[in-house]
C-alpha cells in the first residue's frame, strides 16, 4: 500500500513541479513581452506548455520512475516534519500572497491588478516565504517517495532557486523602486534574523 502511495506521489511531483518552475522562468525575464501580449494569451500559452510538459512526463513515467530505492522509514520520518513545516507556513503566506499574486496577475497586468509591496506578516521576517515553503515541500516529497526522479526534480529546484529569486527581485525593483530596495536591505531572503530583545 505504501509503495503505491509513494509511486503516485512521485508521479504527481515529477509531472507537475517542473512546469511550475519553468512558468516563472518564462514570466520574470520576459515580462514586457507578456504584458504586451495580454493576460488571456499569456495564460493560454503557459497553460498549454505546462500541460504538454506534464503529459510528456506522464507518458515517460515507466522510464522516469524505473529507479526507486524502496520504502525507507528513516527518510519518511524526516519527510513528515518537513511536510508539517511547509503546511504550517502556508496559512501565514496566504494571508498576504493571494491566488492572483501566485498566478502572476500583478506582474502581467499591473494596471488592472494593482498591488502593494508585501512587507507585513511573514514578509516582515523573510522576503521569499513561498520559495522557502516550496523548498521544504520539495525536499519532503523527494525523501518520502525515495525515487531517483524525485531527487532529480528537487535538485532542479535547488539549482533554479537563486536565479529565479534574482529574476523576481529585479522585476519587483522595477515595479516598486526605492521602497523595495529599502525592504531588501532590511529583510533577509529566506532565513529570518533573530534579534536579542
Image: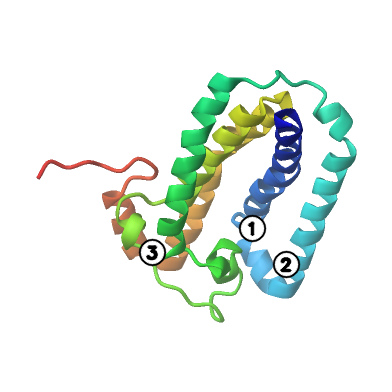
User: What is the CA distance from the residue labelled 2 to the residue labelled 3?
Assistant: 24 Å
User: What SS does tag 2 mark?
Assistant: helix
Percent position of residue 155, x then y: 61, 30
Q: Is residue 63 left or right of residue 192?
A: right
Residue at 59% in and 28% down? 143
Q: Which comes before the other along the chain, label 2 or label 3?
A: 2
Within 10 Å of disc 1 (Cα), the crowding (few <14, some 14-19, many 20+) is many
> Looking at the picture, does residue 102 appear above or below residue 55?
below
User: What SS does tag 3 mark?
Assistant: loop
Q: Which residue is mark 2?
A: 42
Numbered badge on residue 90: none
Numbered badge on residue 118: 3
Percent position of residue 35, x then y: 64, 71
Which is more toward the observer, 32 or 87?
Answer: 87
Percent position of residue 176, x then y: 41, 66
Within 10 Å of disc 3 (Cα), the crowding (few <14, some 14-19, many 20+) is some
Q: Which comes before the other along the chain, label 2 or label 1?
A: 1
Q: Are marks 2 and 1 in contact (CB under 8 Å)?
A: yes
Residue at 50% in and 59% down? 171
**Residue 129 in sight here:** no
Q: How is the image coloured?
A: rainbow
Q: Nearer the viewer, mark 3 or mark 1?
A: 3
User: What SS does tag 1 mark?
Assistant: helix
Within 10 Å of disc 2 (Cα), the crowding (few <14, some 14-19, many 20+) is some
Q: Which residue is mark 1?
A: 27
Residue at the far bottom: name it. Answer: 112
Residue at 70% in and 39% down? 9
Percent position of residue 2, x then y: 70, 30
Q: Nearer the viewer, mark 2 or mark 3?
A: 3
Amino acid at each position: 500500500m505504501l509503495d503505491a502511495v509513494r509511486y503516485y506521489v512521485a508521479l504527481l511531483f515529477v509531472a507537475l513541479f517542473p512546469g511550475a518552475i519553468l512558468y516563472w522562468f518564462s514570466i520574470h525575464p520576459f515580462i514586457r513581452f507578456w504584458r504586451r501580449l495580454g493576460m488571456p494569451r499569456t495564460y493560454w500559452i503557459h497553460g498549454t506548455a505546462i500541460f504538454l510538459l506534464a503529459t510528456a512526463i506522464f507518458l515517460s513515467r515507466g522510464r522516469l520512475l524505473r529507479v526507486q530505492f524502496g520504502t525507507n522509514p528513516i527518510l519518511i520520518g524526516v519527510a513528515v516534519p518537513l511536510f508539517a513545516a511547509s503546511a504550517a507556513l502556508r496559512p501565514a503566506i496566504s494571508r498576504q500572497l493571494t491566488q492572483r499574486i501566485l498566478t502572476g496577475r500583478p506582474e502581467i497586468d499591473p494596471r488592472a491588478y494593482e498591488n502593494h509591496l508585501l512587507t507585513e506578516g511573514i514578509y516582515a521576517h523573510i522576503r521569499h516565504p513561498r520559495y522557502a515553503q516550496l523548498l521544504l515541500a520539495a525536499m519532503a516529497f523527494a525523501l518520502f517517495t525515495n525515487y531517483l526522479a524525485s531527487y532529480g526534480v528537487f535538485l532542479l529546484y535547488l539549482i533554479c532557486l537563486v536565479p529565479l529569486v534574482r529574476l523576481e527581485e529585479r522585476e519587483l525593483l522595477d515595479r516598486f523602486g526605492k521602497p523595495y530596495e529599502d525592504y531588501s536591505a532590511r529583510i533577509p531572503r529566506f532565513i529570518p534574523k533573530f534579534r536579542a530583545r
